[in-house]
Image (spheres, rainbow, N blue to C red):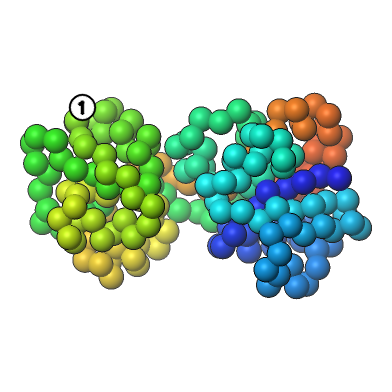
């Protein structure tokens, strides 16, 4: 049986649609279930529903053979997993944003983000030394209350930035969801994994 870790939320819905297009029969009530682990015996699959940041952890430690994770998570955390496929779903991008008239102080500007490694690396490449403030939610609030001069966050439609009076200054990287695999599972269950990869490859949006 293949165990697949899936992120809750928007990625889950799009990944579910992709699996169904690939010919996998999944229960109709799958998306509405409150269960955190769902078995689909007819497809010889088990699904673990997790927070997006936790998917990679489950795969790395082998409690899940495969997982679907955003490229942002892969960039932020160096983990011992293989990236098999770009699923081309949940497209968005990482960006630097802030108040339209907010200037970056010359000495130790503050940047709020839930991606401290990505942010540090990006500003270092720009030749800027910044103070990183790690937040887990409501990143857009940081410039509004004077906690930070800039934020680094995921931008999808840009609506959240606009509604909070913020603007995007720089794009860091495009982000889509990826199919990842545990290295041991890739060796031990190579046939099952290869079938899944082939079937998904045939229906990935171009």
Position of 94 with respect to 22 (left or right) is: left
Q: Nearer the viewer, residue 206 or 36?
A: 36
User: Picture coordinates of residue 1 (x, y %)?
Assistant: 86, 45
* Residue pictured at 83% horizontal, 51% vertical: 45
Q: Residues within 10 Å of mark 1 (few under 14, many from 20)?
A: few
User: Picture coordinates of residue 76 (x, y %)?
Assistant: 45, 37
Which quadrant of the figure has residue 35?
A: bottom right
Q: Is the residue 85 above or below the residue 27 in the image?
A: above
Position of 153 with respect to 1 (left or right) is: left
- Asked whether residue 95 appears in the rendered view, the answer is no
User: Picture coordinates of residue 168 (x, y %)?
Assistant: 26, 54
Q: Nearer the viewer, residue 150 or 155?
A: 150
Residue on which disc 1 sits: 127
* Residue pictured at 61% horizontal, 54% vertical: 50
* Residue pictured at 80% horizontal, 37% vertical: 194
Position of 107 with respect to 57 (left or right) is: left
Numbered marks: total: 1
Which quadrant of the figure has residue 66?
A: top right
Q: Is the residue 194 above or below the residue 162 in the image?
A: above
SS for dot 1: loop
Q: Is the residue 139 above or below the residue 81 in the image?
A: below
Position of 179 with respect to 92 (left or right) is: right
User: Picture coordinates of residue 21 (x, y %)?
Assistant: 76, 60
* Residue pictured at 21% horizontal, 66% vertical: 165
Q: Nearer the viewer, residue 4 or 124?
A: 4
- Asked whether residue 62 appears in the rendered view, the answer is yes
């Amino acid at each position: 049986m293949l165990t697949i870790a899936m992120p809750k939320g928007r990625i889950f819905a799009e990944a579910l649609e992709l699996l169904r297009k690939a010919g996998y029969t999944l229960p109709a009530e799958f998306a509405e279930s409150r269960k955190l682990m769902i078995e689909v015996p007819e497809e010889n699959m088990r699904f673990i529903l997790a927070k997006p940041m936790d998917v990679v952890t489950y795969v790395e430690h082998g409690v899940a053979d495969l997982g679907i994770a955003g490229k942002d998570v892969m960039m932020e955390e160096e983990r011992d997993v293989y990236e098999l496929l770009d699923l081309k779903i949940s497209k968005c991008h990482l960006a630097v944003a802030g108040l339209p008239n907010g200037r970056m102080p010359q000495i130790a500007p503050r940047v709020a983000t839930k991606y401290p490694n990505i942010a540090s690396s990006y500003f270092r490449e720009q030749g800027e030394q910044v103070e990183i403030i790690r937040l887990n939610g409501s990143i857009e609030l940081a410039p509004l209350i004077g906690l930070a001069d800039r934020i680094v966050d995921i931008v999808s439609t840009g609506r959240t930035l606009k509604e909070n009076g913020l603007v995007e200054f720089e794009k860091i990287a495009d982000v889509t969801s990826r199919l990842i695999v545990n290295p041991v599972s890739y060796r031990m269950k190579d046939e099952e994994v290869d079938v899944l990869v082939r079937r998904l490859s045939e229906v990935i949006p171009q």
